[in-house]
Structure formats: C-alpha cells, structure tokens
Image (cartoon, rainbow, N blue to C red):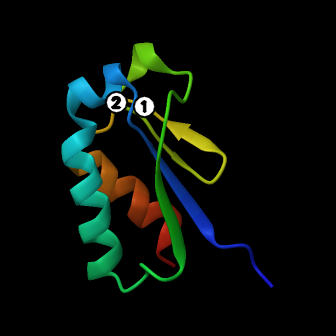
Amino acid sequence: MKKPDEIKICLGSSCFARGNREMVNEIKNFLEKNHISDKVVFRGSHCLGNCENGPNMKINDEVIGDINKARVKEELSKKLTK
C-alpha cells in the first residue's frame, strides 16, 4: 500500500512573516479543488532549515523555497496530480 503524500508548510517566524500564512489557504483550496484532501497529509511545521530561501514548504522529502501563490499551485500540480 502506497504511503500518502505529505505536505508540510513552515510556520516558523521568518516564513510566516514572508507570507506562509496565506499559503496555508492556497494549499487547502488546491487539495479540495482537486479532490485529494483525503489522500494527502497536510500539516504545519516549525523551521524546515531553509530560512534564507523562505517562505518554504516540503512535499514528501523535497523542501521547496521561495513559494508564492503561483509557485504553490505549480509545485502541487507537478507532484500530486497525475
């Protein structure tokens, strides 16, 4: 059985101040729109160790920096929709 995909969004002070608060809703909306909310584990995380390139999120084992609304949608589409 395949392990569910996992998304972590950094809620550390640097990433949070740079816009990850808004990215939480973007990710939730993407998961709902694509009917994959029940197939993906989505949670907040403390520092992902990439502060200088924040805001950050992690999809499975890959940390993705410098995210914004467009980049979040692009990365989620690439990695979670087949």
Placement of 9 over or under 37, stated as above or below: above
Q: In this view, which residue lies farthest toward the right?
A: 1
* x 28%, y 30%: residue: 16
Mark 1: secondary structure: loop
Placement of 36 over or under 44, stated as above or below: below
Placement of 71 over or under 27, stated as above or below: above
* x 64%, y 73%: residue: 4
Q: Where does residue 15 sit, x and y in percent of width and height?
A: 33, 27
Which label is found at residue 65?
1
Q: Pick the residue in front: 33 or 48.
A: 48
Where residue 21 sits, quadrant-wise, is top left
First in sequence: mark 1 or mark 2? 2
* x 33%, y 22%: residue: 13
Q: Is residue 70 left or right of residue 67?
A: left
Q: Pick the residue in front: 65 or 16.
A: 16
In space, the residues marked 1 and 2 are separated at their CA atoms by 6 Å
The reply to whether callout 1 and callout 2 are in contact (CB within 8 Å) is yes
Q: Pick the residue in front: 13 or 1.
A: 13
Would residue 10 be visible to someone looking at this image? Answer: yes
Q: Amino acid at mark 1?
A: Gly
Q: Nearer the viewer, mark 1 or mark 2?
A: 2
Where residue 53 sits, quadrant-wise, is top left
**For the N terminus, which image quadrant?**
bottom right
Q: Is residue 29 left or right of residue 54?
A: left
Where residue 31 sits, quadrant-wise, is bottom left
Would residue 68 be visible to someone looking at this image? Answer: no
Q: Where does residue 32 sit, x and y in percent of width and height?
A: 30, 79
Placement of 52 over or under 62, stated as above or below: above
Mark 2: secondary structure: loop
Q: Amino acid at mark 2?
A: Pro
Total numbered labels: 2
Residue at the spot of label 2: 55
